[in-house]
Amino acid sequence: MRRVTPFDARGYYYYYGSGATDPMRRGSLVGGFNPLSLSPSGFWLPEPQYLFEEEDGTGTITATEAVGYVTDQSGNGSHLVQATAGARPTYQTSGGLHWLQSATNDFMAVARTRAQPWERVSAWRILTLAAATVFAGGNAANNFGALYIDAGGTEIRMFAAAELTGHAAPAQDVDFVVTERWNGASSRIAVDNGSYVTGDPGAGTSGALTLFSNGDGATQFIIARCYGIFERDGATLTDAQIGQLRSYFAARQGRVL
């Protein structure tokens, strides 16, 4: 049997049991569900306790201000970083909700590897719907693992040497959750609880995550909110687990899925 102690000054609480303590951040919980229970390969949330002003992980975020470092809660050390002060997204909050918001040329990035199969569930709002803009880019060499708006400005697509096409782009100024499965010809993408569009975006391995921009971090910037990102590789998620993650991220947007 495990028991929970109150939060400490750093925003942790502790489970005690089996002779060990396991610190978990309170901001990871919504409705009793913690995405860490699904063993993410990477997990990023825009809440002050996970954000820092400087790229070295220093400088406490206390209000709306530029963010240079986002902690990866998965334990794998894939922290998102932006060393250039003028290219940092801002932390925003309203009504108990939290997000990172990009402007003209803001982005953050981390080198990390995602070999197929891997999955990503993430939460967004497009503030300016524009063609050829990128939610999550891949590595600079080939941009494998990119989630983006196509050149016509009408579809949301995936790319890992080819394109998975056919899913209508979400509307501007509307919150949504995206579910991606990267698994060759069995790949798929869905928005909220809508139907999947399936196809083959290629079998390439993603070597980086570039938030709000192309894999080179210098082009195809999207102006958007990001409410959080969950990634896991090595195995596919069950429908029940995907449902938990969708509900979790929608709640972080103030919605119910």
Image (spheres, helix red, strand yellow):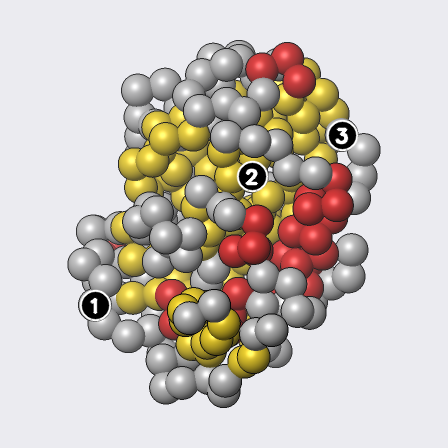
Of the two numbered discs 1 and 3 on the same chain, state the one appearing first in sequence.
1
Are dots 1 and 3 in contact, CB under 8 Å? no
> Which secondary structure lies at badge 1?
loop
Determine whether 211 is above or below 96 in the image: above
| Residue at numbered disc 3 | 196
**Residue drawn at 30 percent across, 36 percent down:** 111
Question: Disc 1 marks which residue?
Answer: 58
Left or right of residue 255: residue 12? left
State whether residue 152 appears in this view.
no
The CA distance from mark 1 to mark 2 is: 28 Å
Q: Residue at x 69, y 44 (%)?
A: 242
Could you tell whether 142 is left or right of 186 in the image? left
Q: Residues within 10 Å of mark 1 (few under 14, many from 20)?
A: few
The kind of residue tagged 3 is Tyr
Q: Amino acid at mark 2?
A: Arg
SS for tag 2?
A: strand
| Quarter residue 63 falls in | bottom left
- Residue 120 image label: 2
